């Protein structure tokens, strides 16, 4: 299976700017010493960058309310965005963000036909 390449960092910055979220991204990155937005949007997995990326996912999710959308904005899979938001919620002690999301059930899923 071929791995799809991540979008280039400057493409991701343009996308954030287009959606009015670049200010949010810059504010988050500014709180993490020694980390740039390019680092956060790259493949870099160092602890400082991963922490800043998790913080950015947390803030972006509050803005767009969609993990697939956050994933597309940052060039990551939506499940990675979910894990990052949960990781940052643990760091800041946000109990509400740690609760499981309510699942939508349909009559077919409940056994009724």
Image: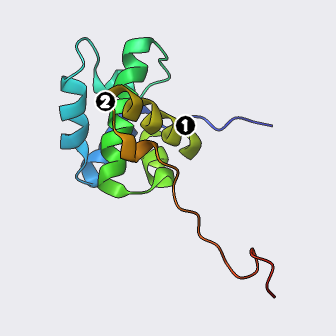
The residue pinned by badge 2 equals 92
Q: Would residue 15 be seen by someone viewing this image from the given angle?
A: no
**Which one is in front, 111 or 37?**
111
Point out the residue furthest to the bottom here: 113
Give me the disc on residue 89. Answer: none
User: At which x and y percent is residue 70?
Assistant: 43, 48
Q: List x then y, in percent, for residue 21.
A: 25, 48
* Mark 1 vs 2, N-terminal side: 1
Q: Is residue 26 above or below residue 63?
A: above
Image quadrant occupied by the N terminus = top right
Q: Is residue 91 left or right of residue 68?
A: left
Front-lying residue, 113 or 34: 113
Mark 1 sits on what residue?
80
Foreground: 21 or 111? 111
Q: CA distance from mark 1 to mark 2?
A: 19 Å
Image coordinates of residue 73 in percent, x first then y, are 41, 46
Q: Is residue 97 visible?
A: yes
Residue that appears at 53% across and 61% down:
102
- Residue at the location (43% across, 38% down)? 85
Q: Residues within 10 Å of mark 1 (few under 14, many from 20)?
A: some
> How many numbered marks have been drawn onto this rendered protein structure?
2
Quarter of the view holding residue 14: top left
């Amino acid at each position: 299976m071929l791995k799809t390449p991540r979008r280039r960092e400057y493409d991701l910055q343009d996308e954030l700017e287009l959606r009015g979220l670049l200010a949010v991204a810059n504010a988050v990155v500014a709180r993490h010493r020694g980390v740039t937005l390019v680092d956060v949007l790259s493949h870099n997995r160092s602890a400082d960058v991963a922490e800043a990326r998790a913080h950015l996912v947390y803030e972006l999710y509050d803005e767009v309310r969609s993990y697939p959308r956050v994933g597309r904005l940052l060039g990551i899979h939506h499940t990675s965005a979910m894990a990052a938001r949960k990781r940052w919620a643990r760091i800041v002690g946000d109990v509400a963000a740690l609760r499981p999301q309510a699942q939508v059930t349909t009559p077919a899923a409940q056994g009724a036909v």
